[in-house]
Image (tube, helix red, strand yellow):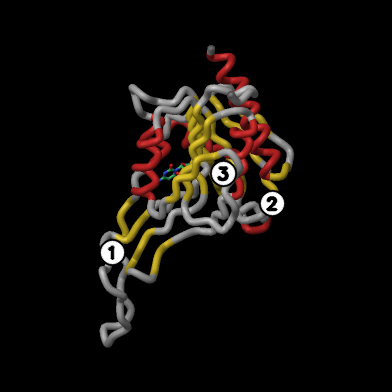
Amino acid sequence: APSGPLAGRHVLVTSGPTHEPIDPVRYLANRSSGRQGHAIAAAAAEAGARVTLVSGPVSIADPAGAAVVRIETAEEMKAAVLAALPADIAVFAAAVADWRPQATHGSKMKKGADGPPTLALTENPDILATVGRLGEGRPRLVVGFAAETDDLIANGRAKLARKRADAIVANDVSAETGVMGGPANTVHILTADGVEDWPTLSKAEVGRRLVAWLAARLEAAG
Ligand code: C5P
């Protein structure tokens, strides 16, 4: 049997972007690489947990020791997350598309005399908020990310409350930080107790520290 601070625990992690289809060949997406979420899944497995990683389309390798569930859309991610419960800890590191095309065309959209089409969008389900608000079956620790370019801490605090998360990992994703797709991250851990500012670390190290921090919290909660 595995040993380590998370032995006997189930950790669920979401990672990567989602792809929201417009037609059979086009989709809406974002610049998430999946590096941070995958690093958290790897660190949790290293800490002895059983790990389920629900990942959008990424070009990086699967983390060692995690069961990977591959999805494309936000709705598929939500279904995979709910199917993977119960979990002791859930970390939502995926960059889920806020919107998806209202309708997916069954065949490739053609250029025509009418000019460019208008893309009508509809809101995607908020997976973190759905899990954070679960009564029965809510993981003991529910952690979200807040990728922001402005008002990092204030926006992170608002997410902590709105999504009923136990912690929000806030990071600045302004282009000049190189966080999106890059190897390093500077994060702030927001909880009801306040904010911890962590130094700039590799995403692997952020993953290890976050897992150690979560293991200690779970231990303290009994
Ligand atoms: O509201 P915003 O998208 O900035 O919140 C970010 C956090 O919420 C991340 O933890 C992200 O994984 C999660 N999220 C989600 N489902 C969505 C949107 C965001 O789980 N549809």
Where is residue 206? Give x, y as percent. 67, 38
Where is residue 95? Give x, y as percent. 49, 49
Quadrant hosting ligand 1: top left
* Of callouts 1 and 3, the N-terminal one: 3
For label 1, the residue is 104
Q: Examine the rendered structure and indicate whether residue 15 appears above or below residue 166.
A: below
Disc 3: CA contacts within 10 A as few (<14), some (14-19) or many (>=20): many
Residue type for callout 2: Pro
Residue 37 is labelled as 3
Write the residue at 67% across / 32% down: 209
Residue type for callout 1: Thr
Residue 52 is labelled as none
Where is residue 72? Give x, y as percent. 41, 55
Position of 132 compared to 49: left or right?
left
Position of 207 compared to 191: left or right?
right
Disc 2: CA contacts within 10 A as few (<14), some (14-19) or many (>=20): few
For label 2, the residue is 183
